[in-house]
Image (spheres, rainbow, N blue to C red):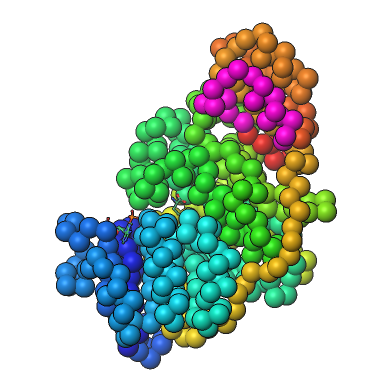
Amino acid sequence: MINIGLLGLGTVGSGVVEILESRKEKISSLIGEEINIKKILVKNVNKKRDIHLNKDIIISNFEEILNDHTISLVVEVTSDIEQSYEYVKLALNNGKSVVTANKALVSKYFEELSALAEEKNVSFLYEASVGGGIPIIKPLKEELILNSVDKVQGILNGTCNYILTRMFNEGLDYDEVLKKAQELGYAEMDPAADVEGPDTLRKLRILGSLALQGKVGEEDIILEGIEKITSFDVRQIKLMKSTVKLIGEVKEYEDGYSALVMPTIVKDGSYFASVNMAFNSVTFEGDNIGELKFYGSGAGKFPTGDAVLRDILDIALDFDRKQNPLGHRILKNNNSEIKDKYYLRISESKENILKSVEDISEKILSTKDNIAILTNEVEIKEIMDIISSLDIEKDEYFIARILD
Ligand code: NDP
Ligand code: HSE
């Protein structure tokens, strides 16, 4: 019997428990033994839970998992970063393998935890941390053996994609759709992590560091979220026969790399425009394989629980090589050289603002109530410097990159 210590019993944790229960016999026949959740660590043991479980296995003291020598695998699906980091480090140091869906944790401590797992000859797997149910980490790691991967691009946040889809397709209001995404279990505990972009940034940091085989740090990624989009922007962008997606992109660029997370205008009918609701898609390009596209459910109880269980099965079947998948390339960040065209809206219509943006404008879309322009091809630094020089609040503008 393989005993698991589960950390967290929220949306993802209960998905893991329920899939394990419903596929019990199939799993046993595949691996030749049973997978048993022996203990479940939660924050509040007294919380009323809508799940059938022996209540005695729900605990609040991690030591009970750490010191249980029959538990060989810790599955971490909490919403906590620092406390979970301590738990994961202790588990790895004690020779227990770890599976996690917690991208904030993976992103913050990626290099350290990957090296520690290799040193202790145990597995550290995190398929569910990027793209919910989509198999992306494992295929990317496998292709890295045969390819140099020089670009990763994707819609990586289900909550943002759900909000944008319903705003563009149904004309719904931002706050109303965000609330719905929270009810559906897509959003993070603090949804600012979704709509302001850090969740996409963390996923991109994980994919980018694997793909380029060198550290792409959180601080190396340009970040703009979708939280400032208004129905005015939706109307303008629909007139361009386009839509907006929050896209993360890391690519080899000039003699280094570029990395950004930005609302991105894509033409109706294009590939990314067809990725809707809480679906995610990731594409990467390898020198042998060419372009690979992955598409599927980016969030939610069962897709994410399924991805966690795939990692658990890989460990149970001893498929994981237990090698640190990260490379040692020292990468030069060339973000300041990225050149693109942008849509820029400023929710004030003042003469001095219009004057400041005129030089970079290819087309002026509006000067009434809001100033909205389409820019020439400009360096991102130039446009951000112009925005900073205007006397406006952070929530008074919306910028989106235009993808050909
Ligand atoms: P929830 O908020 O639904 O559940 C979090 C769980 O973690 C709860 O059971 C909570 O306990 C427990 N918890 C929080 N802090 C601690 C702590 N310090 N010690 C022990 N237990 C703790 O989150 P989700 O299930 O939605 O997400 C879990 C993780 O998976 C997150 O890191 C998230 O980013 C990631 N993820 C989520 C996806 C989704 O679709 N929801 C998709 C992919 C990844 P209690 O029940 O007592 O409050
Ligand atoms: N909050 C995340 C999202 C969960 O909406 O994509 C999946 O990582």
Q: If the image is split into quadrants, where does the N terminus sit?
A: bottom left
Where's residue 334, x and y in %?
76, 47
Query: Residues in magenta?
Result: 380-399
- 187 or 80, which lies in front? 80
Tell whether position 212 is magenta. Answer: no
x 60%, y 41%: residue? 223
Where's residue 183, x and y in %?
32, 45
Evaluate whether residue 306 shows in this view.
no
x 61%, y 44%: residue? 261
Q: Main secondary structure of the magenta part?
A: helix
In the image, residue 135 sits, relative to residue 65, either above or below, namely: above
Where's residue 264, x and y in %?
62, 39
- 402 or 318, which lies in front? 318
Where's residue 303, x and y in %?
42, 62
Q: Residue furthest right?
A: 255
In the image, residue 37 sits, relative to residue 80, either above or below, namely: below
